[in-house]
Amino acid sequence: MSFTLAIVGRPNVGKSTLFNRLVGKRLALVDDQPGVTRDLREGDARLADLRFTVVDTAGLEDANDDSLPGRMRRLTERAVDMADICLFMVDARAGITPTDQVFAEILRKRSAHVILAANKAEGAAADAGVLDAYGLGLGEPIRLSAEHGEGLNDLYVQLLPLA
Ligand code: GDP
Ligand code: MG
């Protein structure tokens, strides 16, 4: 059985970096039309022997980090509703922000399965942020480094029983 994993979280936490790592060059849907912004990117992901669809909530790059505009909320809700599992990503170096708390609230209400990932977790500078992430009330965070490919084994272990 296959499943859909949506990567959600505020801008700049590393969602697209993880998406690209999971998808490689196997991007399923590419919109070539000029002037058209794709807010949700979908790809065929591979993680060891797991095959699944991954959705990246793109199009948030211009959003103000300190607020949660309606667009960010709507886009996240769309991604959550089309997904079987949500990977909620926070930035372990930046720590938990008020915007992260709003995302956590959306997910607690709306998503059946949430995997919490504290990204940019390479090195000791991330330790405090990882501990902070426990306070979101979404369980134990995975220590992830999307850029360096660390923590993917822990992601695999969490996905396996849901797959
Ligand atoms: P998005 O806005 O959530 O999609 O974030 P991006 O994937 O575009 O990444 C935002 C920035 O964080 C980029 O400069 C990435 O290179 C950087 N980044 C992503 N993952 C990591 C990581 O694991 N460690 C560090 N140190 N930087 C990362
Ligand atoms: Mg992105």
Image (tube, grey):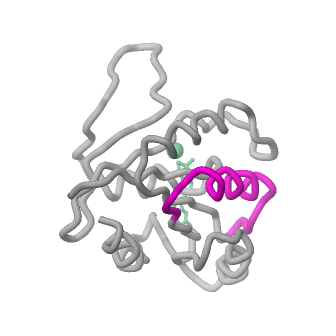
- Determine whether, in the image, residue 92 is placed left or right of residue 144: right
Residue 61 colored magenta? no
Q: Nearer the viewer, residue 31 or 76?
A: 76
Q: Nearer the viewer, residue 134 or 43?
A: 134
The residue at 66%/38% (across/down) is 73
Q: Is residue 132 above or below residue 82?
A: below
The residue segment tinted magenta is 93-114
The residue at 57%/82% (across/down) is 123
- Determine whether, in the image, residue 57 is placed left or right of residue 108: left
Quarter that holds the C terminus: bottom left
Q: Quadrant of residue 98?
A: bottom right
Q: At which x and y percent is residue 9?
A: 60, 52
Q: At which x and y percent is residue 127?
A: 66, 83
Q: Quadrant of ligand 1?
A: bottom right
Q: At which x and y percent is residue 155?
A: 40, 72
The residue at 57%/60% (across/down) is 89
The residue at 74%/34% (across/down) is 69
Q: Is residue 152 above or below residue 20?
A: below
Q: Quadrant of residue 118?
A: bottom right
